[in-house]
Image (cartoon, rainbow, N blue to C red):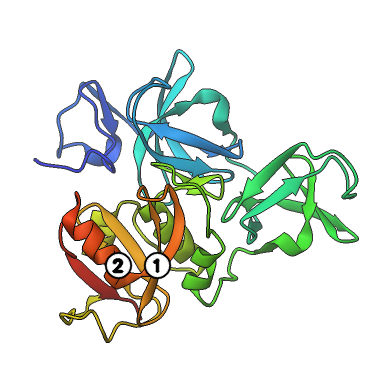
Amino acid sequence: MSFDRRITPVRADLADERLRGQVEAERFTTGTVKRIATTFSALHRHPSREAPVDTQAIFGEGVTVYDEHEGWAWVQLHDDGYVGYLPSEALGEAGPEPTHKVRAIRTFVYPGPNLKLPYQSYLTLNSKVAVTETEGDYARLAAGGWVFAAHLSGLGAFETDYVTVAERFLHTPYLWGGKTSLGIDCSGLAQTALTAAGIKAPRDSDMQERELGTPVAAKPDLSGLQRGDLVFWKGHVGLMMDETNFIHATGHSMTVMIEPLAVAEERIRLGSYGPISAIKRLG
């Protein structure tokens, strides 16, 4: 049986119980549910900080832990199903259940409800938190600390325009595997923006191209596109802002940038990614 290693929790010695009869492994387990308890954590392909990073897990995200050994946990992320290794120190208990999520691209966590206090940590867009009380303009978190309440929203509240969300990451440094305003990659930008708008999206651009939206036939001059259209190459994705311009996280400038699609298309086509592979429209 063939499977996508990125989203299939299977090793030679261990696999998810749900895969029994589908894959070969020495033993199977249901795992233990925990949550990410640090601002974010890189998800590595192997249990080493030098191993490739496939994505990041952010605060409050649920994970299933299948194995822990020498400070590393082998997990599957609940939001997009990615499988990999992260430091055990990044994990916390599963409860309490989140009540809110972060709607700002970044918000500071203070030891008290006062902006003049030295901050103790920060959280990023789409982080999930449990609020226990409010005082003035601040919300107290079950995990400890206070955040500016206006930077939170209910779990069922979503942004109305995912392109506007993407625009808030303008000039963010490019980071392979990144999903935060400290560093983000092309598919991470698309997934993060779509998630904020309540649209479930897979993690990598090939998955997004396959699973999201309906195809749009590209004209030779690339006209007729709309805000929100997703433009794909093999290994790259960007979001149209209007008929002409699009936003993407790119290694070309090592930032999130806005440029005319025609300019980017020529550069990318003549570079390593080749021609546009698909344009998809949501809704």
Identify which residue is drawn at 86% across, 61% down.
137
Q: What residue type is labelled 1?
A: Glu
Q: Which dot marks residue 39?
A: none
Q: Residue at x 33, y 24 (%)?
A: 46
Which residue lies at the image location 87% right of the left edge and 50% below the top edge? 115
- Residue at the disc numbered 1: 259
Tell me if I can see residue 33 in this picture: no
Residue 20 visible in the current orientation: yes
Q: Within 10 Å of the Cα at label 1, are there few (<14), some (14-19), or many (20+) other Cα atoms?
A: some
Judging depth in this view, the residue of 16 and 81 nearest the camera is: 81
As helix, strand or loop, the secondary structure at mark 1 comes to: strand
The picture places residue 113, in percent across and down from the top left corner, at 88, 50
* Above-or-below relation of 275 to 63: below
Residue receiving disc 2: 263
Distance from Cα at disc 2 to Cα at disc 1: 7 Å
Instruction: Using the image, determine if residue 258 lies above or below residue 79.
Output: below
Amino acid type indicated by mark 2 = Val
Towards the viewer: 115 or 20: 115
Secondary-structure class at tag 2? helix
Q: In this view, does 87 lie to the left or right of 154?
A: left
Where in the figure is residue 125, as x and y percent of width and height? 58, 55
User: Going by the image, does 26 lie left or right of 256?
Assistant: left
* Marks 2 and 1 close (CB-CB < 8 Å): yes
* Res. 157 image quadrant: bottom right
Q: Position of residue 81 (x, y in %)?
A: 35, 47
> 66 and 274: which one is in front?
274
> Which residue is at a point 66% across and 50% down the rendered structure image?
129
Corner quadrant of residue 189: bottom left
Q: Quadrant of the C terminus?
A: bottom left
